[in-house]
Amino acid sequence: VIGAKCSRCGADSSADVVLSVCSKCGGALLFGYDFVGISSVVPKSALEGRKDSFWKFVELLPVGSAEDIVSLGEAYTPVLEFSDARFTGGKSVFVKDDGRLPTGTFKARGLSVAVSRLRELGVRHVAVPSAGNAAGAVAAYAARAGLRASVFMPRDVPTANLKECVFLGADVYLVDGLIGDAAGIVKRLKDAVGWFDLSTSKQPYRFEGYKAISFELAEQFGWDLPENIVFPTGGGEGIVGLWKGFHELMELGWIKRVPRLVMVQSSGCAPLVKAFNYGQSEVKELWSHAETVAAGLRVPMPYASYLVLRALRETDGLAVAVDDVDIIVAMRAFFKGGVYACPEAAATLAAYRRLLDDRVLDADERSLLYVTGTALKYFDVMDINRTRIPVLRKDAASLSDVVA
Amino acid sequence: VIGAKCSRCGADSSADVVLSVCSKCGGALLFGYDFVGISSVVPKSALEGRKDSFWKFVELLPVGSAEDIVSLGEAYTPVLEFSDARFTGGKSVFVKDDGRLPTGTFKARGLSVAVSRLRELGVRHVAVPSAGNAAGAVAAYAARAGLRASVFMPRDVPTANLKECVFLGADVYLVDGLIGDAAGIVKRLKDAVGWFDLSTSKQPYRFEGYKAISFELAEQFGWDLPENIVFPTGGGEGIVGLWKGFHELMELGWIKRVPRLVMVQSSGCAPLVKAFNYGQSEVKELWSHAETVAAGLRVPMPYASYLVLRALRETDGLAVAVDDVDIIVAMRAFFKGGVYACPEAAATLAAYRRLLDDRVLDADERSLLYVTGTALKYFDVMDINRTRIPVLRKDAASLSDVVA
């Protein structure tokens, strides 16, 4: 790492101190690296020989020493190919399943990096506003690292997120509002309590974990990435991370072409999709009455939205909002292929189908649907009709031998 | 594969046909391999270069062609080291987290192998009696493979297991009894319905997936396995698989020493522990009033128990039963380390602590606690006290600024 630069005003910061947003303009900071130096020391062939975890790219991540890594076992997550008509109308599509990471979501990537570096820099207490999954990841990595964590979530957060944070030993607070209100509380109390604010896009560390998705994917696809990557988006850190990763891979000369990013939101809360499709440079107003089954997408006013929109435009990207009813249908389709996709992730399939129908995407191109988390955290709100499941007598002699 | 042999009477069977139990004595069948041939074709150094999945050992698994593998992405699961006093009183212990496999449990291993081979042999419909997690894995791999699956579970099975089977598209039946009653139904209706009976130990395929745990662990530990492997046990297939794997690794000359297996059951259902500690060669009577929070351990009369007990004795093993209350405490301890361990898995920590206290195990030896599945499937029965979680006003100016 050679330093950090503001993505808005271009001001430079040292990477050796604890960083939040740009001290001049409040913009999001991004780390820069010495790519010429790195590619001479670690050619990509050397990396391929290391253990399959995004931490294999440690020279391209902002930790000072590999010994300071806080890990819960971030193995490469699988890429599966599906040729089932339920997915694609006949052509094949790729699915990457990040439900297999620690805490069951892709948030593990950003928080493994952030907690590692912050502990290395001497931070002892972190706080995060979250729609749910980031809070779980903060709580888990803080538990592993021996840091104190305070998490702030909307009071109607999915039960699994609330429970995991309690079990993991975090200081848990609910907020009578949405994630933006929680973010306000974390910001207001920062100096009084003395915690580090781990909010989305308000520090440069989490981006780096999502950046490493690009590296992982590039290796998994033999350094020739799929034409389209379909990614669900709440705060937008994943999109920014992927875009940053593509650029770094180009700088390193490890890939020859940048994929198109397809950002997906729920039509119940789609501020980034709206701003993108209206040609705006940032989200200017809070999305009112934000409501969707995909709790992670309920971010009515993302911080540093200008950066998310820039990332999307620079990859010749697309932005789509899908209805909750289509998200539910897509969850079922994923299950029928053996994949436990959370609603946020299922939104990618709903969007992909629409884009194929509308002939915006071509089924002959390689497309990857990014499953950001496991459906298991949503089981309490996914009902089944118990009355339709037969209860057999213990000595049943046929499948209709049910108890009265 | 050079054939299958009965573990009781020694009769040989061909591996080229669909196999269940020994046609002569009903014993469990085990596959045999040409180890001399295999080790000359694929030295372990060649295997190390393959992608980290237990399928890298395909020459030592009973599929005819690698193209027939039914996979949902069975990456190596992480081994984490914990030196926290909450775990060990100061010394370190290893934890392997199989909650990260497809369907969230180690059952994915056995069922990935079994469904692959059975589909290769032309089977179109599989059935399984299960305490829960095996049913989920059968449903998932059958969905991926395009097979029909019928699953039979006790009517008080954990809700998550019931839901996943429904979502995955299996034919789901509850049984007014326990897993043994479900097994009876699958057996009785086998010929009438025409399904293949995938019951624990009643076919040689599932063992092979658990066998591969030994290979995976051996590579992860540099071919020098930990002295003790602590494993929770319901039907016992995992223990048999591990033991078989150790033997094969010795035959191949890839390891020099076999670890001790420590089998853990719940004191609410501990037929194997009882038989082992009474010096019996098999479980002779059904454990009555089987009841435990660890649903997967509720197997009152395991099939082929003689083989589980033999496997344990041949590794100079141990058998321990722990109380549910200690299981719950151990779940909390795992969470405080960032690991989501299901009750079955948490039982290993409860047992390990007891064996250290009793000076049966030595903390200076390397011990590995096997986390067989994720706690996420148990969240609906893991309560928190919501009244103790503060709900802050959205404009809160302090952490005591709660809503009325």
Image: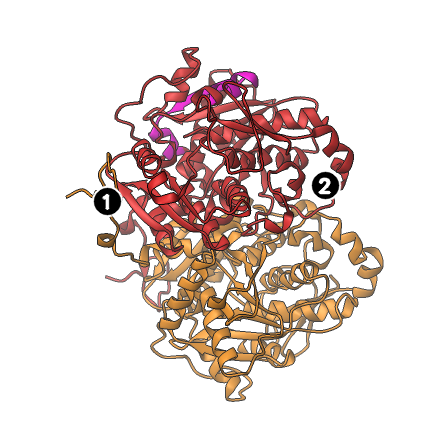
Chain colours: A orange, B red
Dot 1 surroundings within 10 Å: few (below 14), some, or many (20 or more)?
Answer: many
Determine the image quadrant of residue A228: bottom right
Q: Is residue A111 above or below residue B48?
A: below
Kindly identify the amino acid type of the residue bearing the numbered disc 2.
Leu
Q: Position of residue B98 (x, y in %)?
A: 52, 41
Is residue A229 inside the magenta stretch?
Answer: no
Q: Nearer the viewer, residue A105 or B396?
A: A105
Residues at marks 1 and 2, common chain?
Answer: no
Question: In this picture, is A101 found above or below B303?
Answer: below
The picture places residue B357, in percent across and down from the top left corner, at 47, 19
Q: Which residues are magenta?
A: B308-329
- Mark on residue B47? 2
Residue A161: x and y, percent? 40, 55
Q: Position of residue B125 (x, y in %)?
A: 42, 48
Check disc 2 and report its element: helix, strand or loop: helix
Whether residue A358 sits left or right of residue B79 in the image: it is left
Residue drawn where x is 47% and y is 64% of the image = A345
Instruction: From the image, tell me which residue sits under label 1.
Output: A391
Residue at 37% x, 50% y is B165
Q: Nearer the viewer, mark 1 or mark 2?
A: 1
